[in-house]
Amino acid sequence: MGFYVKVEEDVQVYLEDINENGHKTIVFLHGWPGSHELFEYQYNDLIKKGYRCIGIDQRGFGKSDRPVNGYDYDTLSDDIKAVVDELKLKDFILLGHSTGGAIAIRYMNRHKGYGVDKLILCAAAAPSLIRRPYFPYGIKREDVYQIIEGTYSDRPKMLKNFGDTFFYKKHSKWFMEWFLLLGLQAASWATAEIANTWLDEEQLFKDMEKINVPTLITHGIHDRVCLFPLAEQQRKLIKNSKLIKFCNSGHGLFYDEKDKFNKEIMDFIEE
């Protein structure tokens, strides 16, 4: 069932609540620049196993409202809290991919992990997507500048180029066209503002040290967006965490190795 939840006076986010009577609930936070539909191939398997899947479109993306501001991790994590409160969620699994992983990490600190039983990070953009003087593991700052410039000058071309780096395996042209369309659903200003957040955000290092729930870290070793060393840093900073490598995956490990990915998250949930 799809519906909207009010997160601010003039902002609503869209979510799909699939299999509402499932025995365990998983809340999915998508990465940039997609929507909750990125997890289609997880929903297909998980609902068959009796899980409840809640996919949220971040503000500015998918079917959610498109305000001109609110694209910092504090506000985006507050949006998640509003959904949790509205649906009265308890003991759920929070799963975040890429920027969604960063938002999940901020939620765990800013909202004390309210309602979260376990955390799953997938190719998470943390503790820093970009290289910094004290953190040499990310992509170049100039690469993000190019994304922002491309968003404002030729967004379809920028998204096509980004899609070409997203997966390790070669997928059908039809799948890649579908993937491109998900990015095009977003507001251009939201697309650029999230990229600006990557440049400015430095608090995730401290956020991760505050996480105290069992955490699964999944990451493709061929990831060209969030480089694999980020996962190793997450493992060091998050207590009670474990890292699983995906040796035939890039950034889109949920599709490059979807069967393995689905099995690993189900095994972790049932531990």
Image (cartoon, grey):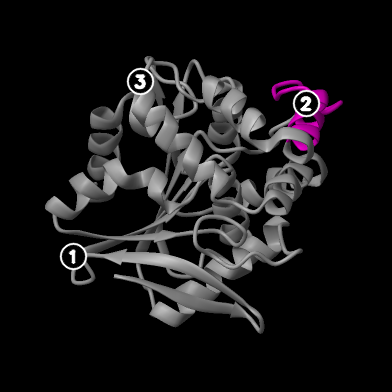
Q: In the image, is 247 to the left or to the right of 202? A: left
> Which amino acid does the dot numbered 1 rest on?
His
Residue sitting at 73 percent across and 42 percent down?
195
Say above or below: 87 vs 122.
below
Q: In the image, is 147 to the left or to the right of 28? A: right
Q: Position of residue 117 (x, y in %)?
A: 38, 60
Residue sitting at 66 percent across and 51 percent down?
207
Asked whether residue 225 appears in the rendered view, the answer is no
Count numbered badges in the picture. Answer: 3
* Helix, strand or loop at mark 2: loop
Q: In the image, is 208 to the left or to the right of 21? A: right
> Which amino acid does the dot numbered 2 rest on?
Arg
Q: Position of residue 170 (x, y in %)?
A: 38, 15
The earlier-in-sequence mark between 2 and 3 is 2
What whole-number distance in Å separates the C-alpha atoms at marks 2 and 3? Answer: 30 Å
What whole-number distance in Å separates the C-alpha atoms at marks 1 and 2? Answer: 41 Å
| Disc number for residue 201 | none
Q: Of circles 3 and 1, which is in front?
A: 3
Magenta stretch bounds: 131-150
Residue named by callout 3 = 171
Along the line of sight, which residue is nearer the eye, 221 or 91?
A: 221
Residue sitting at 69 percent across and 49 percent down?
188
Residue named by callout 1 = 23
* Helix, strand or loop at mark 3: loop
User: Is residue 139 located in the magenta-colored stretch of the structure?
Assistant: yes
* Helix, strand or loop at mark 1: loop
Residue named by callout 2 = 131
The residue carrying pointer 1 sits among few (fewer than 14), some (14 to 19) or many (20 or more) residues within 10 Å by Cα, namely few
